[in-house]
Image (spheres, helix red, strand yellow):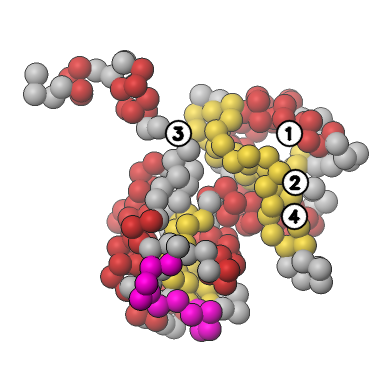
Amino acid sequence: MKESGLRNSCKDMKILAIETTGKYGSASVIDETGLIYSAASSEEMNHLRGMITLIDAALRAAGITKNELTHVAASVGPGSFTGIRIGVTTARIMSQMLNVPCIAVSTLEAMATGALDKAISSGALYVVPVINARRHQTYAGVYEAVFTSDYEHQSAVPVMEEKQYMIEDLLEELKCKTAEYSGAAAFFTGDGIDAYGDIIKSTMSEGSYLFADEELRYQHAESVAKIALRKAVRGETLSYNELMPEYMRLAEAEQRLRAGTLSDRIRFPAK
């Protein structure tokens, strides 16, 4: 929904996109023509200290000020719980301060979008972003590239649900999917490759999988910005208080609390 009174015009768009769900934070500014200006950190998990600096750098590269922004987008998860909170909170504060709408972008969809060109050029039918959630758990989805009628643009369309998978279960479902088309290959991206690359190699048949190179493998705000622009044109925006994290599972402490295994010293600190 759009909040009444928010600045939101399809002309002269300037959208800030924030990515904090992975190891490396980044910020991008995209205009209505699709031109993107970005800044990225080389320090792992430096989101809290570094995001404002990255935002300022992206704005300077675009040659604009914060007051010229028309939207603020955030990669809302899944991914690092702390990173998601930092990105969403930053976007909400800027949206409220600037009186502009927010745009929520799925981290997995953004990862798939970032890998599309390489996947297509490699001959893969599917793009599979995989985020390591530890102990053989992943956040993942499966996407197929769909082109416009003029073949000038493509987008990642989900063909398997974005959700938490055990890596073995994901691969078994994916094997069934690729078996539907002779010679179909899946292009994997994300830090799930780092954690489960050997399992993928031993489970998938030869020629049915490809791995993204490291420079393409991790989350980046540029992909968030591309999706945010399409959403802005379609009017798929939110007010700042509607922008919410997508953790895709409970935090470990919440899981333990529900299971009754959380330490009494944590549950009852006054004791």
Residue annotated with mark 1 = 174
Which mark identifies residue 249? 3
Residue annotated with mark 2 = 126
Question: Is residue 170 shown above or below 5?
Answer: above
Q: Hey, what amino acid is under mark 3?
A: Arg
* Quarter of the N terminus within the rendering: bottom left
Q: For residue 230, what is the image quadrant?
A: bottom right
Label 2 or label 3, whichever comes before in sequence order: 2
Image coordinates for residue 48, horizontal then vertical, percent: 31, 53
Image coordinates for residue 125, horizontal then vertical, percent: 80, 48
The span shown in magenta is 2-13
User: Quick check: marks 4 and 2 in contact, CB under 8 Å?
Assistant: no
User: Quick check: marks 3 and 4 in contact, CB under 8 Å?
Assistant: no
Query: Counting other residues with Cα less than 10 Å from the Cα at mark 2, is it few (<14), some (14-19), or many (20 or more)?
Result: many
Spatial CA distance of label 2 from label 1 is: 9 Å
Query: Counting other residues with Cα less than 10 Å from the Cα at mark 1, is it few (<14), some (14-19), or many (20 or more)?
Result: many
| Residue displayed at 38% across by 56% down | 242
User: Quick check: marks 3 and 1 in contact, CB under 8 Å?
Assistant: no
Label 3 or label 4, whichever comes before in sequence order: 4
Q: Hey, what amino acid is under mark 4?
A: Ala
Label 4 or label 1, whichever comes before in sequence order: 4
Spatial CA distance of label 3 from label 4 is: 27 Å
Image coordinates for residue 67, horizontal then vertical, percent: 34, 80
Can residue 215 be seen? no
Residue annotated with mark 4 = 145
| Residue displayed at 15% across by 22% down | 268
| Residue displayed at 85% across by 36% down | 180
Q: Say left or right for 266 vs 155.
A: left
Residue 172, magenta (yes or no): no
Q: Secondary structure at mark 2?
A: strand
Q: Secondary structure at mark 4?
A: strand
